[in-house]
Image (cartoon, rainbow, N blue to C red):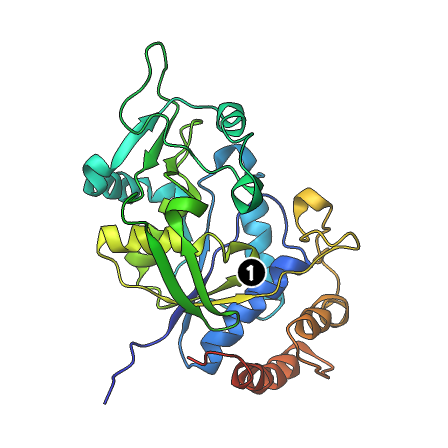
Amino acid sequence: MTVRTPYLGRFAPSPTGPLHIGSLVAAMASYLDAKVHHGQWLVRIEDVDGDRNVAGADQHILASLQRCGMLWDGEVSWQSRRTGLYQQALRQLGELVYPCGCSRKEIADSQLSLTGRQAQALIYPGTCRHGLAPGKNARALRLKVPQAPHCVLHFDDRWAGPVSQDLTDEAGDFVIKRADGFWAYQLAVVVDDGAQGVTDIVRGADLLDSTPRQLYLQQLLGLPRPSYLHVPVVTNELGEKLSKQTGAMAFDHGAAPQQLLQDAMLPAARLLGMELRADHIDAFWRAAVPAWAQVLRNLPNPR
């Protein structure tokens, strides 16, 4: 008989502005998934990218979650207070990490002859893998990805089904500390999830493609692999992912709870495949938990 680890999920927003409907969908899915599995739900503020942080946005996010009735377990954590853990992980990765002096333009220029999928993304060609060229200064830190044999990673996403990626061809050696001095998302999220004991990650499908890089880091750092569920992202009228960069507006302007329910929470539930009726927030959650359980029963990979 298999003993399942108790469920520990999380919502990890970046404080680049207030929550919008797209981020509410991701928060709602992760919260409901924890509730359905009788688990805990953490909130972690991913403020490691200091240049994009907006003053006061973290508190606005936390207040919005509370107003929607999503109450977290334990204390909120901030990535900016956890940098010692990232430095420790960097030491653990050892000689697999190397300095890179290439700019994004130089990487793009090196791929002008590529076609197909490789031409759609900036795949690092390994220019600095064996040392910086004369006159080059280190900009970022990169992590070596195996070249022979190729590093092919597989996982079963609870929503998307089987996912496979050839990390060698489709990502290449990737950045774990950026040229601006900030820790890269890939390293920070893996270290934080491992340190906090997160067992289940529920987030937007825009992060599906980055998951194999995180699996690779988990292997190198000796961390357990969480279960993943990537929900469809909300898009605007142009088909672009709804985000602050594409003009997404805050859903919480301090309106009365009834207005918040009608204008944001019920529409977010519909985007997750749940048609709910509720006249107050407590009733919404009473209906949403079994409705989410039904959504999960129709997925390719139940937990």
From the viewer's perspective, is 205 left or right of 226? Answer: right
Q: Nearer the viewer, residue 155 or 87?
A: 155
Q: Which quarter of the image is occupied by the C terminus? A: bottom left
Q: Nearer the viewer, residue 41 or 226?
A: 226
Report if residue 44 is visible in the image.
yes
- The image shows residue 128, relative to residue 233, as above or below, that is above
Q: Position of residue 126 (x, y in %)?
A: 36, 31
Q: Nearer the viewer, residue 103 or 146?
A: 146
The residue furthest bottom is 1
Kindly identify the residue that appears in the image at 73 percent across and 70 percent down: 267
Q: Position of residue 241 (x, y in %)?
A: 67, 53
Residue 39, located in which quarter of the rendered image? bottom left
Q: Which quarter of the image is occupied by the N terminus? A: bottom left
- The image shows residue 104, relative to residue 287, as above or below, that is above
Report if residue 74 is visible in the image.
no
Number of numbered discs present? 1
Q: Check disc 1 and report the residue beneath it.
A: 204
Q: Position of residue 48 (x, y in %)?
A: 44, 40
From the viewer's perspective, is 142 left or right of 19? Answer: left
Residue 17, located in which quarter of the rendered image? top right
Kindly identify the residue that appears in the image at 32 percent across and 52 percent down: 216
Kindly identify the residue that appears in the image at 32 percent across and 51 percent down: 151
Q: Nearer the viewer, residue 302 or 277?
A: 302
- The image shows residue 19, relative to residue 105, as above or below, that is below
Q: Position of residue 272 (x, y in %)?
A: 64, 73
Kindly identify the residue that appears in the image at 46 percent across and 48 percent down: 46
User: Looking at numbered disc 1 in the image, what kind of residue is underneath it?
Assistant: Gly
